[in-house]
Image: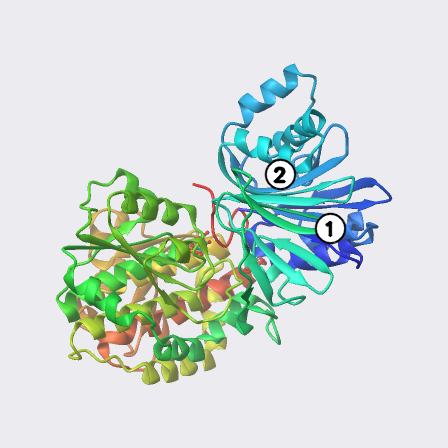
Amino acid sequence: MCSIIGYRGFAPAARIIVDGLKKMEYRGYDSVGVSTLYAGRIETRKGVGKVAEVDNSQRLSALPGTTGIGHTRWATHGGVSASNAHPHQSNSMKISIVHNGIIENYQSIKQRLRSEGYSFKSQTDSEVIANLLQKNMELTGSIRESMLRTLARLEGSYAFIAIFDGGTIAAARFKEPLIIGLAQSAYYLASDVLGFSDQTANAIFLGDKELVIIDASGMEILNFDGEEIQPVVTKIANEFLTVQKGEYTHFTLKEIYEQKSTILRTAEAQWYDSRPILDRLTSCKNLYMTGSGTSFHAAQVGSYLLSKYAKKRAEPLIASEVQFLPCFLDEDAVLLAISQSGESADVLNAVNLAKKKGTEIISVINSLTSSLFRESAYSIGLHCGPEIGVAATKSFTSQLVVMYRLASHLSEGKFNPNFGQVSLAISQILLSSSKIKQIAEQDLKRVSDVYVLGRGVNYPIALEGSLKIKEISYVHAEGLPGGELKHGPLALMNEDVSVILVNPDDCTHADTLTGAHEIKARGGRIIGISNVYNEIYDSWIEIPTVDVATFPIVESVPLQLLAYYTSIEKEANPDYPRNLAKCVTVR
Ligand code: BG6
């Protein structure tokens, strides 16, 4: 997934574009580029690296002109190189484009254009958009016609922005997010409100198969059939207006520390459609929960809680697997789709597949302006504020809080989790973060392999812990149900291996300790995350005692901190882990 941005106004465009790209950098950060229009000529500068680095080396923000576009890349087609970085200019140099998504039929378009004399400088799929626009401009002489003809030719998923040497900026979206920002005498276009939310709070969320053309006479929005669309202006929620790190070194650490208050915000948030949501969840014959990455782990915890406390069977499905799974998605089923961003393509794909079978969609999302929000019958917001760190942290614990609230509602009040107690426990754990830093340095920095074990509802938390360690510290980590170690992975146990036991004093405690002795017997180092000490632990991370049911929320925080500090010890950048992006909008 990439980030794209455009500006047309009276201020120097390049500075605004570079600042906007910095705010959206979590969407992709292997290369960057900017094009601006000045005195009828488009100039492009781009390079490999993060925005600040390339801005420094290529002086991106010094580009002249009050109209421009910019891009940060997460490579899909063509390696990480300056020639594959966006923007891409057409052969005539009169058009420049930035693109997010995948043009699935780019090879046939490229072949055809090549046969008509066009040449290509990159290996990307995106560059065909620039030359196709040029071809259609030369055929029609109209930007509107050239856009419509080009869109009729493209297959796949895309949001792209183009600038033309006459001063017009045009953009279109199909399956990828694109938002227009309206200011006094300026227009912004971006993949995420964060790209311009410090400039204006007035936004238009472009619908699927819609395009926008902005020139000296103003703005027009059309659908792909060329019909005019009346835009709806939305006020961006305050929490999305400014996102700063404050006194924290990284967004990831800031977002871990925010959890003592964000879980309370999620616990107290009003659910507008709670009655119909709870009725549907109660009455549906089959209930499925789906998500990708961290959100899938929240679905696993949710399935456990609904079965245990509400006697409601709910099957967790990995979103990218739904298309291959034989499941009973039909008009009697509900699919609870969990996604922080609401833009993960695998989740949207699973949702579209289910909708085709008549299944009702209820979503749990952080971004209430996302594609998933628009695809859902009902949505439950996390209200934990924007999450910038690529590895999900506060959104995970807020997703868990929503799962607990659902189980409580469906248990007809028999199950009442105490979120106040959980928030206090998290505050206590944050106070001992220096000890966790020490353990990361001592037990995780130098090992080749880490196993994270948990039993029962602690197993998905173990999976989440191992994902965090993999995502941001580049150490191989595997999450396992505690009882499975002896059925294979134990063969890999030796002094170079650390094992994290997610081991609260609940029904799984004794069995997990039994497994610990098998590990110890083969030389493995044991880190125990528990509210009770045991001498088998080489390192103990104490968590406060809370109601047994809510240990999964509390024990997630030390796992996040272990991953964060291991990343620091290994001199990685936890906010922008290599090869990843905050949400992946391509399948
Ligand atoms: C990945 C992120 O791209 O997508 C993970 O790196 C995240 O942190 C996963 O859990 C799913 O994202 P979302 O937005 O659908 O919850």
- The residue indicated by pointer 1 is 217
**Identity of the residue furthest to the top in this view:** 115
Can residue 568 be seen here? The reply is yes
Position of 44 with respect to 379 (left or right) is right
- Cα–Cα span, label 2 and label 1: 39 Å
Q: Amino acid at mark 2?
A: Val
Q: x%, y% of residue 205?
A: 53, 56
Residue shown at 65% from the left, 61% from the top:
182
Foreground residue, 124 or 467?
A: 124
Secondary element at image label 2: loop
Position of 61 with respect to 476 (left or right) is right
Residue shown at 33% from the left, 46% from the top:
350
Q: Amino acid at mark 1?
A: Ser
Instruction: Point out the image quarter for the C terminus.
Output: top left
Q: Does label 2 or label 1 sit earlier along the sequence? A: 2
Foreground disc of the pair 2, 1: 1
Secondary element at image label 1: loop
- The residue indicated by pointer 2 is 80
Residue shown at 66% from the left, 33% from the top:
130
Q: x%, y% of residue 496?
A: 40, 54
**Identity of the residue furthest to the right in this view:** 39
